[in-house]
Amino acid sequence: MIEFRHVVFNRGRKTVLNDICFSIAFTEKVAILGSSGEGKTTLLKLIMRLLVPDSGQILINSTDITNLKETELRSIRRQFGLVFQDGALFDSLTVKENVAFHFREFTRLPEPEIESRVRTLLKYVGVEDALHMMPEELSGGMQRRVALARTLAAEEPQMFLYDEPTSDLDPINAMRIRNLIQELTSNHRGFIIVTHEMHDALKLAERFIFLKGGKILFDGAYDALFRSDVSDLKIFLDELHGD
Amino acid sequence: MHNKSRFLLRKLSSMQDFYLFGYKGTIGFFRKPFYFRDFIEQLDYSGSGTALIILLVALFIGMALTLQIAAEFSKLGMQMYTGRVVGISIIGEIGPVAAALVFAGRTGSGMSSELGSMILRHQVDTLRVFGIDPLKKLICPRIFSAIIMLPLLTIIADAVALAGGWYIISAVNNQSGSVYWDSVRVILEPRHIISGTIKPFIFGFIISTISCFTGFSTHGGAAGLKSATTNAFVYSTVCIIIFDFIISKTILFFTGYHV
C-alpha cells in the first residue's frame, strides 16, 4: 500500500505538489492524469524516494520512507518496477548489457545463463533481434520495451510505475506497450501509469487521479470520471470525442 | 539585500554540498562494493584519450619557451643557462599546469557532460532504483582515475617539453644538446621535483571532483548541460591556477625559501 499524507513538494519557489493525500493498493490499476508540468513524474519519483518531499509523509506498507537512508530504501524500491519516459537505458551499454545489468551487478550467474535469461526477457517484450544494438540505434518504442525487460530482470516487482509509456510513439508501438502493460498486471500486480494520453488511461486503468495546480482535483473510477464537473478534466475527456 | 543574502546562502549551501561530494567520492573508493571495471574504463578514457593532446601541447610549449629564453640569453652571452630556466619552468610550473589545463578541457569537460546527460536522461535515477550508489559507481572511479592518470601524463608531458627544448637548442640554435641536458640536470633540486610531483595529484583531484560535481548538479535540459560543462572547465581552470600558487608557495616555505 502506498500512502501520501499531506505531501508538499517545491521546486525552487514553485509548489509542484501541495498537500497531496491518497492511498493506492499494490493491486490497483491507477492512471495519474494531468498536463505537462503538473507534477505527475514528481509523484512517481516521490514514491521511489528519488525525491524528498518538503513536508508530509509517504508510507510504503506502513513504513515512512521520507527519512530513510539510501541503503534502507533498497528493500522498498525492489517492490516496484519503474520505467521512465525515455526508457533511461545506459547509453554506453548494448541492449544485452542493459538487460544483463542487474544479473551482473547482483548475482554470480555464469555468462551463458545470463545470456539465456536476457534472450528470454527480450523475446518476451518482442525485441530479441536488438540484442547487440546500442540504445541510440533503437526506436523510442523499442527503447521502452528494452527498459521494461531490464526492469523485469531486476526484481519481481509487486507494482509497476510507468512514466508516459506511450508518449511520442506511433499507434502500433503504443499498442504493443499497452499490451505488455496489461500482460504484466497478471498475478494481481497493479500499476501506476502517469500519462496525458486519455486513450491509454481509459484502456488500462480502473482508477483515475487528476492533478492540476499541485492539487488532486479528481480521484475516482471510470464512471465517476465521465460524470465529473471538473472543467480541466473535461478538456482532457473532450480529446476522446475529438477523435 | 534579501536577494543578496538568499544568493549567498545558496552559494554556501552549494559549497557545503561540494565538500560532502568530494569527501564521499574519495572515501567511497575504499569501501565495498568496488567497481574495478568502471575504474579501468575511466583510466582508459582519461589516459589514452588525453595523452596525445597533452604531448602535442607540451612539445610546442617546450619549444616556444626555449626559443624565447635562448633568444634573450644569447644577447647576454648566457646560452649555457637556457636549460636551467627551461628545466625549472617546465618541471616545477608549466608542465603540471599545462597538463592539468588540457586534462580539464578534455577529460573534465567529458566527465561533466557525460554525468549531466545521465542525470537528465534519468540514468542516475535508474541506478538508484536498482540499489546502486551512483557516487560509488560513477564518481569514485572518475576521481581516482584522474588522481592516478594526471601525474603519469604530467611526467610524459615534462619529458616531451624538455625534449622539445633540446630540439630547439640543438637543431635550431645550433648549440650543444649535452650542455642543455647538463644544465637541466644541475639546476633541478628536490623542491622542484616535489613541486612537480605533488601538483598533478592535487590537480587531478580538483579537476575530477569539480567536473563530477557540476555534472551531477545538472538541471534544465540542454542549456543546463552546456552550463555544467562550461562551469566544469572554468572552475577547474581557476582552481588549478590558484592552487598552483598555493602549492608552490607552501613547498618553497617548507624547503627554506621564505620568499
Image (cartoon, coloured by chain):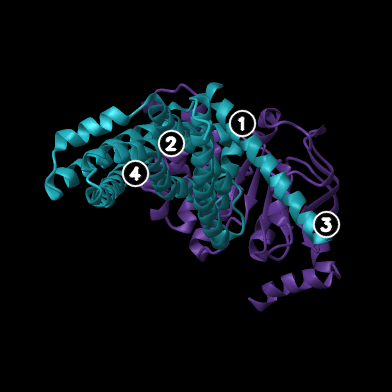
Tell if the residue under mark 3 belongs to the same chain as the one under mark 2.
Answer: yes
Q: Is the C-beta separation of discs 3 and 1 under 8 Å?
A: no
Kind of residue sitting beneath label 1: Lys
| Marking on residue B50 | 4
Residue A146 on image: x %, y %: 48, 46
Of residues A83 and A186, the one nearer the viewer is: A83
Q: Residue at x 68, y 59 (%)?
A: A201
Q: Is residue A88 visible?
A: no
Tell if the residue under mark 1 belongs to the same chain as the one under mark 4.
Answer: yes
Q: Residue under circle 2?
A: A118
Residue A235 on image: x %, y %: 75, 74
Q: Chain of mark 3?
A: A
Residue A196 on image: x %, y %: 67, 63
Q: Residues within 10 Å of mark 4 (few under 14, many from 20)?
A: many
Q: Residues within 10 Å of mark 2 (few under 14, many from 20)?
A: many
Kind of residue sitting beneath label 3: Asp
* Rendered shade, chain A: purple
Q: Which chain is cyan?
A: B
Query: Going by the image, does B150 lie left or right of B168?
Result: right
Which secondary structure lies at badge 2? helix
| Marking on residue B24 | 1
Tell if the residue under mark 3 belongs to the same chain as the one under mark 1.
Answer: no
| Marking on residue A101 | none
Q: Chain of mark 1?
A: B
Q: Residue at x 75, y 52 (%)?
A: B8
| Marking on residue A219 | 3
Q: CA distance from mark 3 to mark 2?
A: 39 Å
